[in-house]
Amino acid sequence: MATSALDGLTNTDTQSAEGDSSGESSDSSSDGGEDVAAEDEPVPIDTSAQPAIEQLSAETGPDYEAWERVAVRAEQGLANETVSSFALDRLRSEIVNWRDDLLEAESTNSTRIDTVKAQISALGEKPADGESEPQAIADRRTTLNTQLETLMAPAVLAQEAFVRANGLVAEIDAVIRERQTQHLIERGPLPLNPVHWVDGATAMWNAVTSIASETNARIISRFSSGRIWESFIQAALMFVVGTVLIARGRSWIISMQDRVIKGAGTWADALQFIISLGQILLPLLGVWIITTAANVSGLLGFRGQLLVEALPYASLHVIIAKWISFQFFPEDTEKDSLLGTPGEEHRRARRIVWSLGWLLTIGYLLTRLVTVTDEPDTIAGVVLLPIELLLAFFLYQFGRLLFRTSKKEENKEVYRYRFFAVAGRIAMVIAVVGALLALAGYDVGARALLYPAVRTLSVLAVIMLIQRLIIDLYIVWTGSPDSAADALMPVISAFLLIVVSLPILALMWGVREADLLELWSRFREGFIIGETRISPGDFVTFAAVFAIGYSITRFIQSTLRSTVLPKTRLDIGGQNAAVSGIGYLGIFLAAVIAITMAGIDLSSLAIVAGALSVGVGFGLQTIVSNFVSGIILLIERPISEGDWIQVGDQMGHVRSISVRSTRIETFDRKDVIIPNADLVSGQVTNWTRGNSVGRVIVPVGVAYGTDSHRVEEILREVAEAHPMVLLNPPPNVYFRGFGADSLDFDIRAIIRDIHFIFQVQSEMNHEINRRFSEEGIEIPFAQRDLWLRNPEALREMARSQPSEAEQTEIKSQAAEQKAVTSEPPQEPIAPDVPDKKDDDNDNEGDEIS
């Protein structure tokens, strides 16, 4: 790596907060002079290990002597508080390049080191104190250890230098961030003081007149030299083309949209959005052409060129604002707005968005104009105060618009509008705080708050529009517009858009590009566990190898399930167990191979894994128990897929056996998930284990007095005649005993398929009923005698109750009496009911059977 001296140990930081190119040029020139001076000065370096460092540098690549000089200069620059931030940033870039080389150097001789370590391991453990080993082995161990130390020296030295580089980068970042913070909270002149208005107006007038003077001088110089017409025609033509594109570009795109979307069908919305991007590209192209024409003309001086070169970026604000306004708030008030605003508010919302865009454009141009004055920090707060106050006002109005829209009754429960409510509140708060900061003289803080807030809203708006385009394309692809917004693909795309926008938002809010690159470098470095460094590349390798192994495993499973195993004598349960076992084995092997290919040393993680396994063992005992039980079920196979089992009060067919649980489908077509541990340790009834033959029991009762032998003959004939009943062993009929109401018999028969047990019972009962009817055999039913203790009391109560006519007359009299007096009518007195007596003789009353 080529080395350079300390980049600018200057006493003042002349670079402006806005990144003024003129300031950068002056800094670069002054830094360059000081770089030369720094290179001429001797840098103190520790030379005690110089020979070893030179030898390692010659053998391994990085120039550690040059790195030592850079590191020492960086440490000296950090110790000097007068070094400019621009110089520190350049020095940081050089250290970052060194750090990348040092990170790569950490893997020097890694393959050879692994080989030597394996050789040392092959010699066995080193003898303990007081023990000895053969001299040849001891000599060989000493030689290999010496060789290992020599091989590891470059990596160790690179690792030490890498840690030093990381520390220096972190120190430089801390210094620059501290200076940025101090600059943000620095208070300038109070803009409300009229004295500063005169100074600001004078400074701006001087800036404008200096630009005009430079331009006038260039024009006179061109005229006097006769070169005014060399590029005038070309610049004039370019100016005309650029003006036409700015003035007519949007109307051309709208006309194209109307023509294209007429026959587009489902593609209409997507094509309309894609074509609408021309409303940004054509005007922006026109601004760029005008800027180029101004430079080609050669009539602008340094300050004029500085202002003109800012036009494309400045105009981008108003161009995008106008495009966003028509996308969110269309001129056709019947169309729905993405923000849910009613049609009558579209015009007002568009004006707010346009105003924000124009204010950003004017503010950026005024900021560039302020930088060419003699005292930019003094007059910036005064000149930019009107822009900042107007920006805060319209930002507050837009925040109110979002908040009001989200508070409508039909929008309260929608997540998108809840987000709009939060965004609206934040926008209003930022507007108020930014305005107060600007009025108090904290101009840099106000700009750092208001400008990024408006740009953040524009980025979120663009994300929403791109998401809508993705949904439109998804509708074209699937043809289902109703569920497109909630489908998985659009949701994932929205998440990815937000992730991609995070660096852009970070840059808008003042995060330096170097900070983002540093974050990416740290991510690329990975992290260290034990002696193993795990980087994102290792994760990618692991994921790729594991995905390949997993795909191969699934392919083998599919081939076995559909082609190989059906041709064997294994039953369905055995086939499923074999396929599942191969799947678990394949996934395990894929994981092991992926870890090995990624270069992750599991031996260095053994202690950490052991400690974690203890904690996991206590916390996941049930899951581990179910996992082991699932393996037992697959190997031992007490139950298989398709078996009819009963576990407790749950009965059904086994549909799947996984490593944690077993799914049973009941006869109600409901799935019951049973932990595997319950199947291994509990009692399980398997109705179809090995075969589907089973026994059916049909109970039958006949009336007392029936010929029991004839009943037995009939039942045996019915059982033997059924096609599902096996004759070997033959069905049996048992006279079980004398019941309370009947003589009880049982048919017990072996049927071919236990799955038809209920159908066989039903068919046998039908046949038994038919045969008993033909033979005149009665099937009894339960009979009971009911005795009343006091029938006389019941008769007396029935006679004492008034008839319906009497009840109607009593009610009418009560109503008449209520109309005459406010006193409530008297309730009719119920007749006396004689008391019930426990007299044994009363039991001899009437009998009701």
Image: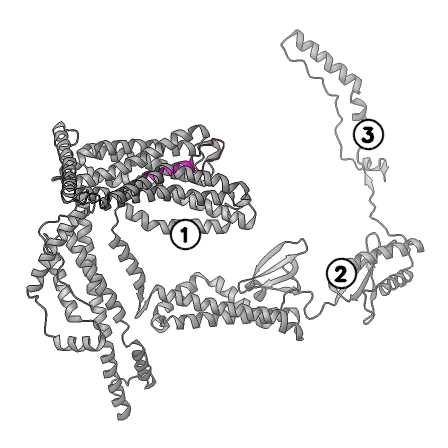
Three-letter code, disc 2: Ile
Circles 3, 1 touching at the beta carbon (< 8 Å): no
Tell whether label 3 touches label 2 (CB within 8 Å): no
Magenta range is 317-338
Q: Earlier in the sequence, mark 3 or mark 1?
A: 1
Q: Classify 715 as above or below 420.
A: below
Mark 2 and mark 3: Cα distance apart in space:
55 Å
Whole-percent x, y for residue 212 in the image:
16, 37
- What colour scheme has been applied to the protein in the rendered image? one colour
Q: In which quarter of the image is residue 456?
A: top left
Instruction: Give the number of the mark in front: 1 or 2.
Output: 1
In the rendered image, residue 340 lying in the magenta stretch gets the answer: no
Q: Which mark is residue 792?
A: 3
| Direction front: furthest residue | 226
* Kind of residue indicated by mark 1: Leu
Q: Can residue 650 be seen here? A: no
Q: How crowded is mark 3: few (under 14 residues within 10 Å), some or many (20 or more)?
A: some
